Every structure is written in C-alpha cells, then in structure tokens.
Image (cartoon, grey):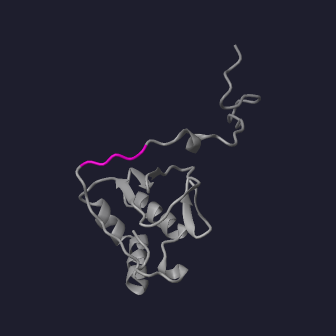
Amino acid sequence: MDDAENAASDSERILDTDLRNIANGLWEAGAEAVAINNQRLTSLSAIRVAGKYPTVNYVTLTPPYIITAIGDPASLGARFLDSQTGQEFLAARDAVGLRYQLRNVDRLELPAVGADNLVLRHAENVPVPGRPGKSQGKEDDK
C-alpha cells in the first residue's frame, strides 16, 4: 500500500487508522498471521501515529507499507476486498488515489513475535467460582 502520488494532505496518505483497519479486516477475512513492514502483529501490538508516519510496535514506518498475511490463498484476498474494510479502502483508493497491489505467493514467512510484544503489563488473581479463598493461578492447598 502507498500514499497517493504527490500526496499533499492526510486524506491522500495511508494513516495509522488505515493500517489498523486493514489488519483487522485481514484477520476478519481469515488471516492466521499479519505483519506490516516486517512488524508482526499480535493482540498487544500498537498501531499509532507519531509525527507524520504511523508506528507499529513502536517502530516508525514509512511508505510503501508492505502488509503480509498468512491465510488461504484461494480466498483471503477476495474475502478481504469483499469485506466492509476492503470496500472502504477501495472507495478511498478511487476517491483520493491511494495505491495498493495484491498478490498471492506460494511461500511466505513472517517474523517471529518479539519478546517485547509479549510482556505482561498487568495481572490479577481471579476468584474461582464455588471455591472460597481460591484463585486461578494458585495451586490448591494440600
């Protein structure tokens, strides 16, 4: 994906919200794994804007944005383009000239999830129903 040629405004650029929507649309269409510019996405990934360019996993990215997804090559692209997210992207492409190319490949490897993306930031014991004084994550007293 890329900005419109000679993009002069945010409406002609790929924004963090576009990348989030595309990633969510790919998962909704059946993708098993997604990466943007070699940044593997997880449920803890952050896609935000920092200055002029989006960041993914706190890494600043610049266009073009290479979005890779593992899924059924016979249906993933079509299911994505038929989804609401895909239709919205196609409408934006037609309206302001955003660019994209979709292709299937026989073999694809995505980067492993980095340890920084799997850091647990908050945890708490949850009471076990019907077991006063016991919490999930604690072994039973013997």
Write the residue at 25% across / 59% down: 104
- In the picture shown, does residue 59 fall above or below 134? below
Viewport quadrant of the N terminus: bottom left
Closest to the observer, 73 or 133: 73
Q: Which stretch appears magenta?
A: 107-111
Residue 20 image position (x, y, % from top left): 51, 64
Is 89 colored magenta in this rendering?
Answer: no
Q: Residue furthest right?
A: 133
User: Which quadrant of the structure image shows residue 87?
Assistant: bottom left
Residue 53 image position (x, y, % from top left): 55, 67
Write the residue at 55% across / 38% down: 115
Closest to the observer, 16 or 73: 16
Q: Is residue 53 left or right of residue 66?
A: right
- In the picture shown, does residue 21 fall above or below 88? above
- In the picture shown, does residue 63 fall above or below 109? below
Is 109 colored magenta in this rendering?
Answer: yes
Characterize the magenta stretch by its predominant secondary structure.
loop
Residue 61 image position (x, y, % from top left): 51, 61
Closest to the observer, 56 or 17: 56
Q: Residue furthest top?
A: 142
Q: Residue furthest bottom?
A: 95
Q: Residue furthest front?
A: 6
Q: Is residue 102 left or right of residue 11?
A: left
**Number of numbered discs:** 0
Closest to the observer, 33 or 57: 57
User: Which quadrant of the structure image shows residue 96?
Assistant: bottom left
Write the residue at 68% across / 26% down: 138
Residue 75 image position (x, y, % from top left): 27, 60
Write the residue at 45% across / 61% down: 23
Viewport quadrant of the C terminus: top right
- In the picture shown, does residue 12 fall above or below 132? below
